[in-house]
Amino acid sequence: MGEDSRLAGVVALAQGMAAAHSSREVWWAAASGGCRALGGSFAALSVWERELGRLRVLVNVGERAEDEDEFPEDEAYPVHQFAEITEFLHERWAGGGEPHAWVETAEGPAAGRRPGYVHQRVAALRRRGRGCCVIAPIVLHGRAWGELYVARPVGAPVFGREDADFATVLASVVAAGIAQTERLEEVRRLAFTDALTGLANRRAVDVGLDEAVERHQKDGAVVSLVVCDINGLKRVNDTRGHAVGDRLLERFGSVLSLCGAMLPGALAARLGGDEFCLLAVGPSADEVVKAADELCRRASELELGEGVACGVASTEDPIGPVASARRLFRLADAAQYRAKAERATRPVVAGRQGPCDPVVRLADEPSADQPPGERRRFRGRG
């Protein structure tokens, strides 16, 4: 393979990873780009999960064996089955420099490799009809992150020293692409996360609620929203300081997360100030009310604050058509405002009179067309 073609392979790999929009796309671009650049028939990208002592395969591309899925859910190998990993990273890399790629063949350990242990890679090559492979460690932030593995079939030219050198370069390009993706994902995470509580923020709720209502209109999925307001936060801030008030917000956030776990897939969020919410898609309205009731009970037991005012609105209850996220938010907010005004210790539920106090048929709920300014405490969308 000439220098021009190898340079083109590096450029194509970098461009493919840069064009990816998700972690899965990045993994696929890394493996497929490395496979093409090295003239392989198969490639895999794996991550080293130190805490679990294993290599977990993220993606397989090219000519896959029957037991190799493109994006496997549970393909992982204990590190002790690959003694060369810890030998290479801890013994050879420890002396300085960067880890270098190496070659294995189906004939046995490559020249210069230490014999004396069962070589799982050789067995895997033979079992899957491959003649050789090159393994390139991927280093991220100064630590071994995982590996790029590229193989060729039996009968194809065996990888040589120059191929291993080139694989080392490709692994560096892959590492740079993965690092960039992780930074972008962290930016996205921060954009949708409340810094104080670690819960989702208002932006995340807006996006999630829009998607949930679209799903409700498309296939009738039950969408429920719990909106709550911590009672007594201003008093805590005024008498004990904002640091203590922040601690109340953090503790309530933990309680909200705990109760949200009762509803599979629910989004727990802080809307801002002392206002929080739970967005659930799928669970029944009764399940959501039960979780909201538990939330009120636990909030009342917090050392700080004076409990919580909680309102619930669900498309499964008789609240009329929900044609927009704005309307469901208005209904939940109106129920919460009623709970606040009546000092209710249990959730107020829009559209029903049930086990939760008080009676909650909200005759004075704002309509979908009513301007936000017509109700003093409305904090709806738009």
Image (cartoon, rainbow, N blue to C red):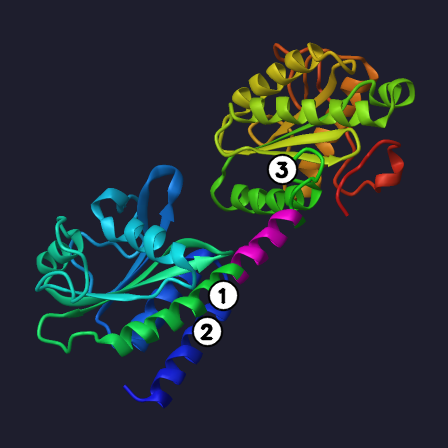
* Image disc number at residue 321: 3
- Viewer-nearest residue: 329 or 317: 329
Q: CA distance from mark 2 to mark 3?
A: 49 Å
Q: Does residue 15 show up? A: yes
As drawn, the residue found furthest toward the front would be: 95
> Marks 1 and 2: CB-CB under 8 Å?
yes
What residue sits right under mark 2 in the picture? 14
Q: CA distance from mark 1 to mark 2?
A: 9 Å
Neighbours of disc 3 within 10 Å: few (<14), some (14-19), many (20+): few
What residue sits right under mark 1 in the picture? 176
Q: Amino acid at mark 3?
A: Pro
- Viewer-nearest residue: 119 or 371: 119
Q: Which segment is the magenta one?
A: 180-190
Please provide percent x and percent y for residue 290: 56, 17
Q: Amino acid at mark 1?
A: Ala
Q: Is residue 63 above or below residue 340?
A: below
Q: Earlier in the sequence, mark 3 or mark 1?
A: 1
Please give left or right for residue 5 compared with residue 335 in the image: left
